[in-house]
Image: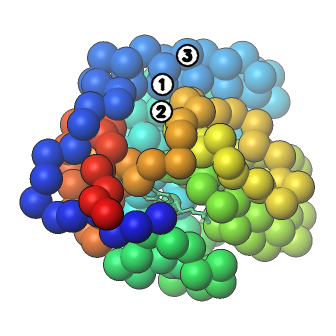
Amino acid sequence: MKKPQLGQTPRVLFDEEAIRRRVDELARQISADYAGKGEVLLVGVLRGAFLFLADLCRRLTIPSRVDFIAVSSYGDKTVSSGTVRLLLDLRGDIRGRHVLIVEDIVDTGSTLAYLHHMLGLRDPASLKTCTLLHKAKADAKGTPVDYIGFEIEDDWVVGYGLDYADLYRTLPYIGVLQVNG
Ligand code: IMP
Ligand code: MG
């Protein structure tokens, strides 16, 4: 993918209302699936998933806790390096817990595959994955993606937690950056 130019206003893809509706639906589905199983541990992937996780967790009707993990693979580029680096690990032990990984977006799938493998080795009672956005070309390398908010094209999207070179993260909507050239 070519580099988006900075300084542009993203084209709106999902506005606040569309995001709210979809997060409501996901929360209902997740609450129903986990009902009666006890507590779910939501593992937010920093930094992109912070707003999605904040909205999602407040709409769940099941008992939940929150922890965070941080990984890096892009730097200031829009092409995945393919190598995922752990920047910050979870605070707590996940053995015997129902763990739900909460991601902002699955692009190449490297990040989710890495996290799913790593957390799976820690003996959770169950391990599922949830992403707000999923690129149609994504290949999660065999990793199951259990909950998907929206399927999108192979564009660079920003806002609602997602960034480009650490910009646009605090926009309330999700937009597409235009790529020149
Ligand atoms: P993957 O490992 O290629 O699936 O990429 C996963 C991570 O890259 C996501 O968790 C995002 O943080 C980031 N990412 C991938 N595509 C986009 C995008 O279109 N906009 C913003 N961040 C993205
Ligand atoms: Mg992410």
Q: Callout 3: few (<14), some (14-19), or many (20+) C-alpha neighbours within 10 Å? A: some
Mark yes or no: residue 10 visible. yes
Of the residues shown, which amino acid type is indicated by label 2?
Leu
Of the residues shown, which amino acid type is indicated by label 3?
Glu
Residue 16 image offset from top left, x and y in percent: 28, 24
Image height of 120 relative to 160, above or below: below
Task: Give me the residue at 10% from left, 60% from top.
Answer: 7
Q: Which residue is mark 3?
A: 25
Residue 98 image offset from top left, x and y in percent: 77, 46
Q: Secondary structure at mark 2?
A: helix
Distance between the alpha carbons at the discs numbered 1 and 3: 5 Å
- Upstream in the sequence, badge 3 or badge 2? 3
Image height of 19 relative to 145, above or below: above
Q: Secondary structure at mark 1?
A: helix
Q: Which residue is mark 2?
A: 56
In which quadrant of the rendered view does residue 34 lie?
Answer: top right
Image height of 91 relative to 32, above or below: below
**Numbered circle sitting on residue 90:** none
Residue at the extreme front of the image, as rendered = 181
Q: Nearer the viewer, residue 175 or 72?
A: 175
- Upstream in the sequence, badge 2 or badge 1? 1
Distance between the alpha carbons at the discs numbered 2 and 1: 6 Å
- Marks 1,3: beta carbons within 8 A: yes
- Marks 2,1: beta carbons within 8 A: yes
Residue 97 image offset from top left, x and y in percent: 78, 51
**Numbered circle sitting on residue 23:** 1
Of the residues shown, which amino acid type is indicated by label 1?
Val
Q: Callout 2: few (<14), some (14-19), or many (20+) C-alpha neighbours within 10 Å? A: many
Task: Give me the residue at 65% from left, 41% from top.
Answer: 136
Count every numbered label the image shows and give the total. 3
